[in-house]
Every structure is written in structure tokens, then in C-alpha cells.
Image (cartoon, rainbow, N blue to C red):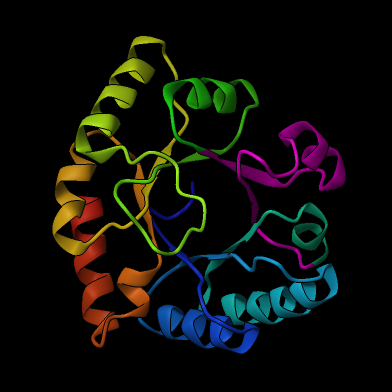
Amino acid sequence: MLPKLQYISQGATPVMHLMHIESALDAGVSLVQLRLKNSSDELYLDLARRVRTLCNTYGAKLIINDRPLVARDCDADALHLGLTDTPVAEAKNLAPGMLIGGTANTFEHVKQRCAEQVAYIGLGPYCFTSTKEKLSPVLGLEGYQSIITKMKAENLHTPVYAIGGIELNDIASIVNTGVYGIAVSGLITRSSRKEKLVKEINHILYHA
């Protein structure tokens, strides 16, 4: 299974994405999602290949956001699809054998993702985040608790990553709702003590 801590890349330019990813890997992150919006496939693939090489160096896994062909052509470990991205069935044809994760915001979305047989679900947002332009309604702890409870009642076992504006002091409470892991961006990017932070996050995720 994938590591419980997922770092989602951010940056104003491809070079900044690469720089932030390298510093996250250097701090001990072992799962990176490259999320480069509003770029050509060529630019995306060029960056994806560089990130793939970096991840290989650190023994980390790579998820590509949104682009099945880029994920296939850079030999990514997984592809992540938002609710308005390429449909999962189509992506499976474009990138055969690829692990696919999908975004969800409601229990209905979760049921849809489980029916599509995704490898994991990115469920959020936990709270307000400036990383996404079009933010879905925030879930908060109660939202996660409610959705995870319904999943158990309907025997749905797809691993769930909590995502969206998560800070260090939120993580233990989020994990206690029953989610598998968390996906963060700004929390790690902004930190001046990344290695210490990553160790703290992983300790909570694996020992909560």
C-alpha cells in the first residue's frame, strides 16, 4: 500500500515545484503527488520525468495529478483524478495497470469512487485551503467521522486520505476518525524544519 503521508507539490513555476519536491523528499517524504495545473502535456511530462528521477533517487513513490498519458509516459506509480478530470474508466484504458486515486467531497462521491475501484480516495477539504481555486464545502472532523462511519456500514474499505488545509495539531484528531492517511502541501512547503515536521507527522500517522 502507499505511504500514509502524501506531499502535493506547489509552486508558481515548474522549477519551484521541483525545488519544493526535492526539499520534501530530503526531509523524509516517501510519496509525492505532482500537481501542475494549466500547463501543456509536454511541459508536464518534462517535469514529471525529472520528478520521477528524483523520486527514484530517494526511493519514493510518484503520483501524477490529472494527466493519464503523462502518468503512463513518466512511469509514475499512480494517477490522481479530480471529480471533473478524465473519467476513471477512460484513464484505465489510457494508462493500463496504473494505480488510480480519486477525489471525493461527499459520501455519494465516495460510493462512486469505490464503484470505480480506485486504489485510494482523497477526501476533502478538511478546512479552508488557498491551494485550490475551486474549493468544495469543507468537511471538518464531523464530516470525516460521518463519511467513514457510513463507509464501514456499507462495507467500503478503500483507503481514504484526508486533504485540505491540514495543520500539525489537526492530524491526531483526523486519524482518529478512521482515515488511512493525510495529503498536505503548504504544511511542509512552508516549514523551516521540514525533517523534524515529517518525523512528527509520520509518528502520529503510524502510532495514533
Decide if residue 50 is on the left or right side of residue 89: left
> Is 13 placed left or right of 89 in the picture?
left
Q: Quadrant of residue 155?
A: top left
Q: Position of residue 58 (x, y in %)?
A: 51, 79
Choose top left, top right, bottom left or bottom right for residue 162. Answer: top left
Q: Locate residue 159, reporting x and y percent.
A: 43, 36
Please tell me whether residue 149 is drawn above or below residue 127 in the rendered image. above
Q: Residue at x 49, y 26 (%)?
A: 110
Q: How many marks?
A: 0
* Rendered position, 81 above or below 73: above
Q: Nearer the viewer, residue 191 or 134?
A: 134
Q: Which residues are magenta?
A: 74-103
Q: Is residue 208 in view?
A: no
Any magenta on residue 87?
yes
Residue drawn at x 49%, y 46% as measured from the top left? 1
Q: Position of residue 181 (x, y in %)?
A: 35, 48
Determine whether, in the image, residue 25 is placed left or right of residue 91: left
Residue 180 visible at all:
yes
Q: Residue at x 65, y 26 (%)?
A: 116
Q: Find residue 108 and report its horizontal and vertical position in percent.
A: 49, 20
- Determine the residue positioned at 29% across, 49% down: 127
* Image quadrant assignment for residue 190: bottom left
